[in-house]
Image (cartoon, helix red, strand yellow):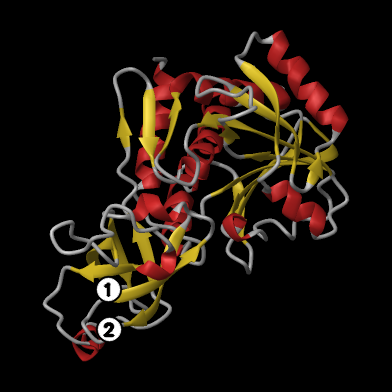
Amino acid sequence: MKVHVLDILNDAKTILEIPSPTGYSDKIIEYLIAQLKKLPFNYEVTPKGNLMIHVSGEDSSKHVALSAHTDTLGLMVRSIQSNGTLKVTTLGGIIVPTLDGEYCQVITRDNKEYSGTILYQAPSSHVYKDANSGVREVDKMFIRLDEVVKSKADVEKLGIQNGDIVAIDPKTTITSSGFIKSRFLDDKISVAILMSILKEMHRTQQRPQFDTTFIISTYEEVGHGTAWIPSTITEMIAVDMGCIGEDLACSEYDVSICAKDSSGPYDRHMTTHLKSLAVEKSLNHVLDIYPMYGSDVSAALRGGANIKGALIGPGVMASHGMERTHADAVEATYELLKSYLNLA
């Protein structure tokens, strides 16, 4: 595995271990800002909480953007039960059956954290006939707190209340065979890729061809991450995960170039150009269509942005569940973005 790719994976592991379910982005943005303070680029945080890093290009006649989202799927406390357990609601489209037995952290309004376990309402095969067969739906799941709580009042004394964030353990692992497996590679692996490109530009003293804004968004999983972008941007690439599965060409070793998703087709000229760059550099790549998918470019277009848009990203297996990708896909995505920015 190449050193810079291993660095991306290790950076991703750090980012993945900082909880940031949709609506709870402060800590992850603070971490990224601490990294940016070591670099010479100007940045700002928008009122919504998106982080924007501005890089001057060799040519200021055009303003382009790359986006990746650091918000993840998660849960929120819906109610406190009389026996001291918590009922929850979902943040984003997580695959609920994969949550059964997962560890989590409940984060209160005053930032206290309490560990717990997400369980199905019939959690014991020695007690419940439907322990194996029951359908795992969010209304049938609860959180068992790792605190001595026997009543609703006991839980409230801890400071836990309705609306508290629940972060799910990502269980991030990097294998010697080049895989990174974790929850929330969608889309923190892409955040790590963009941060690596910024570090590489600083190290080599290179500038992109055109003025470029790197956008780290915080509400993509609920559909409005980059509904607003600066009006000077005319071209934007969402760097997100590539889908793997039935009727799709993508694998864990490819960079995916998406031709169309649920929001409609991406710009034909941009996707053709990106494919040409991938061919020119002999990168593992595919073109695919994702019928149950939307991106930050989708949100920008719905928000009225007058842009050309494209979507690329490393192939990720088992999206919105226990995800996995490979160093080859990460490297291909990194190299394709460098080519798009005209970096050596």
Kindly indicate the quadrant of the structure image that contains residue 286: top right
Q: Which residue is drawn at 37% across and 66% down?
A: 166
**Closest to the observer, 15 or 199:** 15
Q: Do the residues labelled 2 and 1 touch (CB within 8 Å)?
A: yes
The label number, if any, that marks residue 97 in the structure image: none
Q: What element carries label 2?
A: loop
Q: Which residue is drawn at 27% across and 84% down?
A: 159
Between disc 2 and disc 1, whose residue precedes? 1
The amino acid type of the residue labelled 2 equals: Gly
Percent position (x, y) of residue 177? 33, 17
Q: What element carries label 1?
A: loop
Q: Distance between the residues labelled 2 and 1?
A: 8 Å
**Closest to the observer, 344 or 165:** 165
| Residue 343 visible in the shown view | no
As drawn, 303 above or below 152:
above
Q: Which residue is drawn at 64% across and 18% down?
A: 285
Residue occupying the far front of the picture: 129
Percent position (x, y) of residue 250? 60, 24
Indicate left or right for 115 with 264 as reference.
left
The amino acid type of the residue labelled 1 equals: Lys
Indicate left or right for 78 with 264 as reference.
left
Q: In which quarter of the image is the C terminus?
A: top right
Q: Residues within 10 Å of mark 2 (few under 14, many from 20)?
A: some
Percent position (x, y) of residue 170? 34, 47
Percent position (x, y) of residue 327? 45, 22
The label number, if any, that marks residue 112 in the structure image: 1
The label number, if any, that marks residue 159 in the structure image: 2
Residue occupying the far bottom of the picture: 153
| Residue 153 visible in the shown view | yes
Q: Residue at x 15, y 80 (%)?
A: 149
